Amino acid sequence: MPEGPSIVILKEAVQQFKGKKILEVSGNTKVDLPVLKNQVIVDFKSWGKHFLVCFKTFTIRIHFMLFGTYRINERKETQPRLSFRFSNGELNFYTCSIQLIEGDINEAYDWSADVMNQKWSPVKAKQKMLANPDMMVCDALMDQQIFSGVGNIIKNEVLFRIKVHPASTVGELPPAKMKALLKEAVVYSFEFLEWKKAFVLKKHWLAYNRKACPRDQTPFTKKNMGRSNRKTFFCRTCQQLYV
C-alpha cells in the first residue's frame, strides 16, 4: 500500500494535467460518477494515502489499497479502473478504490492531520492521542485521523529512531518521547519522499525488513501487531517499553 510520500510523488507527476479538459473517459469502475468528458481538472491534491482529483463542484478520491497502481502516458495490458485522456497525454489508474466526494473538498478533509501538509498540527495530533491513553503507539502512528500518510514502513522506522517499543501505550510515553514521535513522523516522511524519488529508499531502512539492530546487533523481533495486525520489527534491547 503506497504511503503518503508516494502519493505526493504522484501529485507532483501529474501537474501537466492540471487545468486541462478531459477529452475521453473509460474504465471499469462501478461508481456512479458525473459526466467527466469535457470537465476541467481544477487541481490535484493528496491527503495521506488518498489521491484527489478535484473538479469545480466535486472530487474523485482514489485509494490504491494494497495492489493499486497508476500509469502516466502509458498503459498496462489490463483494463484500468479509471482512465483520463487529455490533449497532452493520459492518466490511468488500476486496481484501486474510487469514491465520489461532492461539494467543497476542504470541508471533507482535515488537512491538519496530514503529516506532509503545510497545515499539519502536532498539537492536534497529541490531543487525539492523549484522548486514547491506552492505545499502543504502533496503532497511533497507523491511525490516519492522527497521522494521515504514515504507513507501516514509516511506523517501524520512526519507532526505531526514537527508541520506543511499538507496544508502548500513548498515555505512558514520557513528554520527550511524545515530542520525538510527533517530530519524527514528519521528518521521516519527508526523508522517505526524497529517498523514494532517488530510488534509494530501501538502502535507508534501519528496522523495516532488517534482521538485526544496527545499534547493538540484537536480532530484531518480527511480529504482527496492533489493530491492523501489520508486520512490525523492533529491538528488545534499545527500544524501551512504556506501559
Image (cartoon, grey):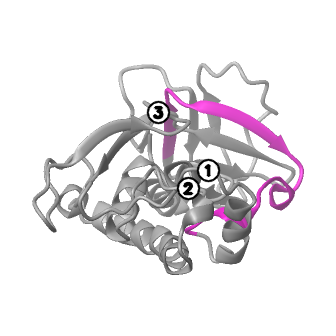
* Measured Cα–Cα span from mark 1 to mark 3: 14 Å
What range of the chain is rendered magenta?
90-116
In this orientation, does residue 174 appear? yes
Residue type at mark 2?
Thr
* Measured Cα–Cα span from mark 3 to mark 2: 16 Å
In this orientation, does residue 87 appear? no
Q: Is residue 224 left or right of residue 222?
A: right
Q: Residue 229 — which label?
A: 3
Residue 140 belongs to the span the image colors magenta: no
Q: Earlier in the sequence, mark 3 or mark 2?
A: 2
Q: Residue 135 — which label?
A: 1
Please name the residue that numbered disc 2 is placed on.
Answer: 169
Mark 1 touches mark 2? (CB < 8 Å): yes
Q: Residue 196 — which label?
A: none
Question: In this view of the protein, which residue sits in the foreground, 149 or 135?
Answer: 135
Residue 91 belongs to the span the image colors magenta: yes
Question: In this view of the protein, which residue sits in the foreground, 150 or 100?
Answer: 150
Residue type at mark 3?
Asn
Residue type at mark 1?
Met
Q: Is residue 206 left or right of residue 73?
A: left
